[in-house]
Image (tube, rainbow, N blue to C red):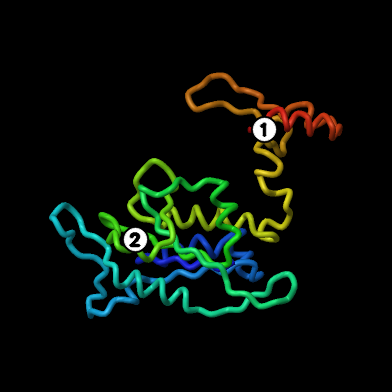
């Protein structure tokens, strides 16, 4: 799976993607994550990526041309894939613009997007992106929630993380997928913790549920199923 992220702040993303599980998955070549600086696709000496909106209004709008050129460059990286029967096939790519008007991104969407070979994410900034990007460049628009961010970079990190988890081998074990095992309370050592909240006179003993100490795996699994969300 190839992830190509178009942004004016690539360093903001590189730090996140080079660490932990995603960093290891990249090293193992299970995934490829590349950031593209949209400013590199401008044609003026000031590397301008935004301008005033037609019709007036506050803020600036990201320009169509550098984004279109960046998407074209990301798409032009040719690579061959083979189907299960060994035949060559063209990579399936999807261009996504993050927008407050987009479809809400959730686990179902992550599973759908994990079926593609390449995802190209466009991260907007300022007052938004020239609408012609949504009209003719992007295949779809996505939103990560009913709130407004200062840019699409945080949304890109969320989407890459959620989709990458669906790719076999990224988590090491399929059982690590929370959607497979369910989300239930977890505990570790020590068995009993003595804790006093600041400003509180009394100390509490926080104990691990007895069932988890029983060694009875059936009871533990039943408890987890009953506690999962």
Residue 21 percent location from the top left of the image: 62, 59
Q: Which circle marks residue 136 in the picture?
A: none
Residue indicated by mark 1: 228
Q: Residue at x 53, y 19 (%)?
A: 201
Quarter-of-image position of residue 11: bottom left
Considering the numbered disc 2 on the image, is that residue within a helix, a strand or a loop? helix
Q: Nearer the viewer, residue 106 or 225?
A: 106
**How many angstroms separate mark 2 from mark 1 (CA)?**
42 Å
Residue 167, horizontal then vertical, whole percent: 65, 59
* Residue at 72% from the left image edge and 52% from the top image edge: 174
Spot occupied by residue 192 in the image (x, y as percentages of width and height): 71, 30
Task: Using the image as rendered, state which of residue 195 and residue 115 is in the foreground.
Answer: 115
- Depth-wise, is mark 2 or mark 1 nearer the camera? 2
Quadrant in the rendering for residue 183:
top right
The quarter of the picture where the C terminus appears is top right
Verify CB contact (< 8 Å) between mark 2 and mark 1: no
Q: Decide: is 113 above or below 103.
A: below
Disc 1 secondary structure class: loop
Q: For the N terminus, which image quadrant?
A: bottom right
Q: Which tag, 2 or 1, sits closer to the chain's start?
A: 2
Tally of marks? 2
Q: Is residue 10 above or below residue 229?
A: below
Q: Is residue 46 above or below residue 15?
A: below
The residue most toward the top is 202
Return the residue found at the far right. 216
Vertical position of residue 78 compared to residue 51: above or below: below
Tell me the residue that label 2 is attached to: 135
From the viewer's perspective, tell me whether residue 1 is left or right of residue 68.
Answer: right
Q: Residue 166: image x %, image y %?
A: 63, 55
Query: Mark 2, residues whose alpha carbon is within 10 Å: few (<14), some, or many (≥20)?
Result: few
Q: Residue at x 69, y 71 (%)?
A: 83
């Amino acid at each position: 799976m190839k992830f190509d992220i178009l942004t004016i702040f690539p360093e903001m993303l590189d730090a996140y993607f080079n660490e932990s599980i995603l960093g290891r998955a990249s090293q193992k070549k299970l995934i490829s994550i590349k950031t593209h600086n949209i400013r590199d696709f401008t044609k003026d000496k000031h590397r301008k990526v935004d301008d005033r909106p037609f019709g007036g209004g506050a803020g600036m709008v990201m320009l169509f041309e550098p984004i279109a050129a960046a998407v074209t460059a990301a798409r032009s990286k040719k690579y061959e894939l083979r189907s299960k029967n060994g035949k060559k096939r063209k990579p399936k790519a999807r261009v996504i613009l993050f927008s407050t008007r987009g479809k809400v991104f959730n686990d179902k969407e992550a599973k759908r997007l994990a079926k593609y070979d390449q995802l190209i994410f466009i991260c907007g900034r300022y007052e938004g992106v020239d609408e012609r990007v949504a009209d003719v460049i992007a295949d779809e628009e996505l939103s990560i929630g009913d709130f407004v961010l200062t840019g699409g970079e945080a949304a890109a990190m969320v989407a890459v993380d959620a989709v990458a988890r669906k790719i076999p081998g990224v988590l090491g074990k399929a059982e690590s997928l929370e959607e497979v095992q369910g989300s239930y309370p977890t505990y570790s050592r020590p068995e009993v913790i003595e804790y006093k909240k600041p400003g509180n006179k009394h100390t509490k003993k926080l104990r691990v549920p007895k069932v988890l100490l029983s060694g009875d795996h059936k009871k533990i699994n039943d408890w987890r199923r009953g506690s999962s969300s």
